[in-house]
Image (cartoon, coloured by chain):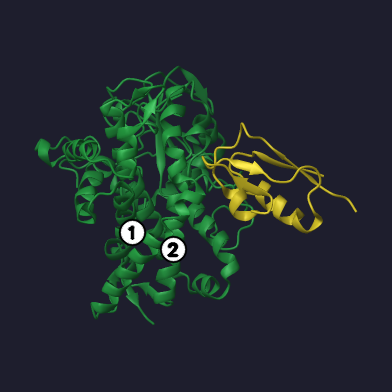
Amino acid sequence: MPDVPRPPVTDWATDFDHTHPDYAASAPEIWDELRETCPVAHTERFGGAWLPTRHEDVARIAKDTDNFSSQGIIVTDWRPDVPRPMGYAPPITSDPPFHAIARGLLLQFFSPKAIDGWEATARATCRELIAEIKASGTDLVDGAADYAQHIPVRVIADMLDLPREDGDKFRVFIHRIMEEPGQNQVLDYEDTLEAYLSRKIIERRENLGDDLISYLCNADVEGMALEDRHIFGTIALLIIAGIDTTWSGIGSSIWHLAQNPVDRKRWLTDPEVRPFALEEFLRFYAPVTMARLVAEDVEVGGCPMKEGDWTLLPFPSANRDPEAFDNADEFVIDRQRNRHTAFGLGIHRCVGSNLARMEMRVAIEEWMDAFPDFELADPESVTWSTGQVRGPRAMSIRITS
Amino acid sequence: MPTVKIKYDRDACQGHNRCYMLAPELFDTDDEGYAILLVEGDVPAELEEKARLAADNCPEFAIEIID
């Protein structure tokens, strides 16, 4: 938790704060209200930031890489000091033309067919976790902490050939970066993600394997080996972006199913609905809000964005825009027309989207097969993450069958 | 019987793979995960519904059905 409480927000249109606990508690209601009353909100916090809430404006910014830079993608009180076009975590922090190079190195590992090869790992992980839950002998389980959070950690650890036991370390690193950005804790260097990965990169260079870290250590771009900061940044990205997000997507899906017995029954009895249900989970509970830095003064939705301002890209708000979706505020398990933006839009479409989707599908399938009936043990006690990734972090579930 | 054609815009495609998942008879993916349109010309009548589904779910509006 923050050392200093964030000042309360009195007006979300002119003083929003997406890192405030009130935002975590009721972001969908805040987006709906802003979309109606002030579709591009502003705050002086973070040195000046914007919050567009309509699909049209979010899409426009996501696709405009001239006026909006990815040099910064997590809103903080300061501005990133790693220069364009690579940024500190390529390709997510990269701008054209370097972006295509950094992204091109990764795409082959994350295509749908490549990801098929990891499904067995994900399924085995889910089954191990479920066996542990069943063996615990209680009907109460934390669906976020005991189940959802472990699944992406184990798969990405295997893809990078890192020990699964290091998963707890990953979660600490991620929490600091994603949920407490800008809170300057004094850290021992040896206890940082940078130190951890630097050691791993040195080890891997001496003993190359067939994992993704080895591939990057061995890769070249036009005959030149990748810079160390490029390798470090990309691996840090895969760990950070691949875990918090998917964990949130799985947790939100379980949160929904816990409260909707009709949807549980439909999932169990109608396998053909599952692909549509999965995309609807992604639309309705999209975990990720990205950000951009304004690179050149530009107007969006009548608002003057100035060079150096932040703008958030709340894809989950775009997904609930009634201009873009029929019955946008309803979860429709068999929704047929669903151009959701959970994985972003434009050149920065989530490189891990096929992995995330596979992990979510397998995690829900295995959970529902094991626990067809369950409910929130105490709905009021569920806590949601703050910041730019939204999902349940503590979620006590009572298994009822 | 009227038939439809598919217009696929490779430049707009960002590799979301929604078309490939919904209509694998009509779309494959390349090694990097971008879509490959598998049919040239008229879409077989029994796949018309899947073609519309693929178009209606593309986040980038990269697929158009020409009636």
Residue located at (63% from left, 34% from top): B10
Q: Is residue A350 visible?
A: no
Q: Which residue is mark 1?
A: A151
- Rendered position, A208 above or below A165: above
Q: Residue A225, position in %: x, y?
A: 32, 25
| Image position of A328 (left or right of A287) | right
Residue located at (37% from left, 49% from top): A245
Residue located at (67% from left, 46% from top): B55
Chain that bears disc 2? A
Q: Which mark is residue A273?
A: none
Q: Residue A240, position in %: x, y?
A: 30, 43
Q: How many marks?
A: 2
- Few, some or many residues within 10 Å of mark 2 (<14, 14–19, 20+): many
Residue A83 figure quarter? top left
User: Which residue reaches farthest right?
Assistant: B1
Q: Answer with mark 1 or mark 2, whichever residue precedes in sequence.
A: 1
Q: CA distance from mark 1 to mark 2?
A: 10 Å
- Rendered position, B32 above or below A114: above
Q: Which element carries disc 2, helix, strand or loop?
A: helix
Q: Drawn colour of chain A?
A: green
Residue A398 figure quarter? bottom left
| Amino acid on which disc 2 is placed | Val
- Few, some or many residues within 10 Å of mark 1 (<14, 14–19, 20+): many
Q: Residue A340, position in %: x, y?
A: 55, 47
Q: Which residue is mark 2?
A: A362
Tag 1–tag 2 contact (CB < 8 Å): yes
Most foreground residue, A65 or A196: A196
Q: Residue A112, position in %: x, y?
A: 51, 50
Q: Drawn colour of chain B?
A: yellow
